[in-house]
Amino acid sequence: MNDYLQELLKEHQYDKKLKEEAIFRIFFGGEDVRDVQESLGIHDHCVIMNWVNTYRKRIEDGLISIPPMSKKQQQDLVALHQRIKELERSLKNANLMIL
């Protein structure tokens, strides 16, 4: 039984590159979570959302810098508005850290 549990746990462990790809495709590429889940063979969309939320929190806490936008994102008005909100949150959090 113990071997079965070990195999089950290994089955649902994902490497760092896969996590980063999923996060960037959703967070910065604007792709749908379920589309990314399906294309990467991830068993549950909640797993990806946990990765995205953790990444977002680390950005807000100033632990990760926000990468520059792609040309496609710069041309997308919705992405631009989202980017402005992200930068405003980051700036607000940075100001709080200074105080």
Image: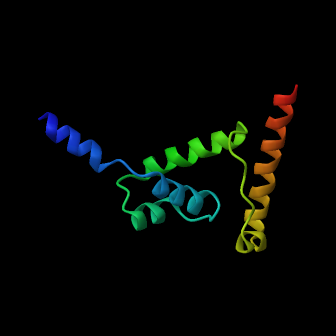
Q: Farthest residue to the left: give it.
A: 1
Q: How many marks?
A: 0
Q: Residue at x 68, y 39 (%)?
A: 63
Percent of width and height locating residue 10:
28, 46
Colour mapping used in the image = rainbow
Question: Which quadrant, please, contains the N terminus?
Answer: top left
6 relative to 34 in the view: left or right = left
Q: Is residue 17 left or right of residue 98?
A: left
Q: Is residue 75 above or below residue 52?
A: below
On the rendered image, what quadrant is the C terminus found in? top right
Q: Is residue 39 above or below residue 85?
A: below
Q: Position of residue 2 (x, y in %)?
A: 15, 34
Q: Residue 82: x, y in percent?
A: 74, 57
Q: Is residue 74 left or right of residue 32?
A: right
Closer to the camera in the image, 30 or 8: 8
Q: Residue at x 49, y 57 (%)?
A: 17
Q: x and y percent of residue 31 in the render? A: 57, 65
- Residue at image position (74%, 71%) is 76
